[in-house]
Image (cartoon, rainbow, N blue to C red):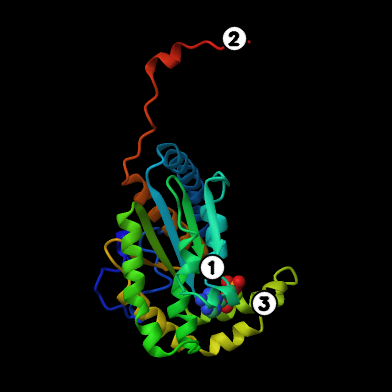
Amino acid sequence: MKRYRVKPGSKVDLKEWDPNDRTEFKESKEEGKQMLLPLNQKIDELQELLYAEHRHKVLIVLQAMDTGGKDGTIRNVFEGVNPQGVHIVSFKKPTLDELDRDYLWRVHRHVPGKGEIVVFNRSHYEDVLVVRVHELVPKEVWNQRYEQINNFERMLAEEGTIILKFYLHIDKDEQAQRLQERLDDPQKRWKFNPGDLEERKLWPEYLNAYEDVLSKTSTEWAPWYIVPANRKWYRNLVVATTLIEALEDLNMKFPDAPEEWSKIRIES
Ligand code: AMP
Ligand code: MG
């Protein structure tokens, strides 16, 4: 979905990106939900082809504010896709062992191998987001990371990795509503984290940090997509379609097998 791709080198002002946009799919919510099913099936087929061809590697990075919908996107977009074919890696607060090393150390070991799709639920971008907002390292340190990240991702791309990065864009009102829903619903209350309220107070700082990420690290080899995410069904359709387009662009083929194999008859 070209419309949501951040042009490399452009300066992103998130006020200009509408989290309610629905230009690509004007259907109703019910229709929109139905439209995801054939896309799930398509992703499943393309995943099998990716695995069979054993040539390309696919890395998907998901970032968002709290309640932005990273978990829901994973659950919905990969519904019905062979569970063996997709690896999800969630990055939490670094352990002491991880903090003793460079911030890419824990990330690099999880990148996809040939034929694999890996989804990062949070990623190395936390090291220029939460780390910047909470001043966990000095500015001189985080400020160098944009270029380091671009170089890291360029290396992965040059070694055959397709990289797609999605920022799930919700607004502050939508977050209020989602946090309230968590509190009101006994089945969802466990998801509430009082710390999220403290983070919410830092909304402008996070927005700023995200704008820098999107402006400085959307590259030809690893572009960012800003996904309108106030509507969950719309968000799912945008992510699924973008992934399908990227996979189809690979023009993958099943490996050739000898023709005479078709004549083999297996004796019982
Ligand atoms: P959740 O995704 O809600 O399970 O929360 C994971 C938490 O880990 C979030 O609060 C992140 O901000 C935090 N986190 C992830 N990566 C880092 C990092 N590199 N440094 C500090 N905190 C992080
Ligand atoms: Mg959380």
Q: What residue is at 47 percent from the left and 68 percent from the top?
A: 105
- Front-lying residue, 50 or 103: 103
CA gap between label 3 and label 2 equals 60 Å
* Badge count: 3
CA gap between label 3 and label 1 equals 14 Å
Q: Quadrant of the C terminus?
A: top right
Q: Earlier in the sequence, mark 3 or mark 1?
A: 1
Q: Is residue 127 above or below residue 247?
A: below
Q: Secondary structure at mark 2?
A: loop
- Image coordinates for residue 186, horizontal then vertical, percent: 75, 72
- Front-lying residue, 235 or 11: 11
Residue labelled with disc 2: 267
Residue labelled with disc 1: 69
The residue type indicated by label 3 comes to Phe
- For the residues labelled 1 and 2, say whether their Cβ atoms are less than 8 Å apart: no
The residue type indicated by label 2 comes to Glu
Residue 11 visible at all: yes
- Image coordinates for residue 3, horizontal then vertical, percent: 30, 63
Q: Secondary structure at mark 1?
A: loop
Q: What residue is at 40 percent from the left and 24 percent from the top?
A: 257
Looking at the image, is mark 1 or mark 2 nearer the viewer?
2
Q: Is mark 1 within 8 Å of ligand 2?
A: no
- For the residues labelled 3 and 1, say whether their Cβ atoms are less than 8 Å apart: no
Q: Is mark 2 within 8 Å of ligand 1?
A: no
Q: What residue is at 42 percent from the left and 46 percent from the top?
A: 114
Residue 174 visible at all: no
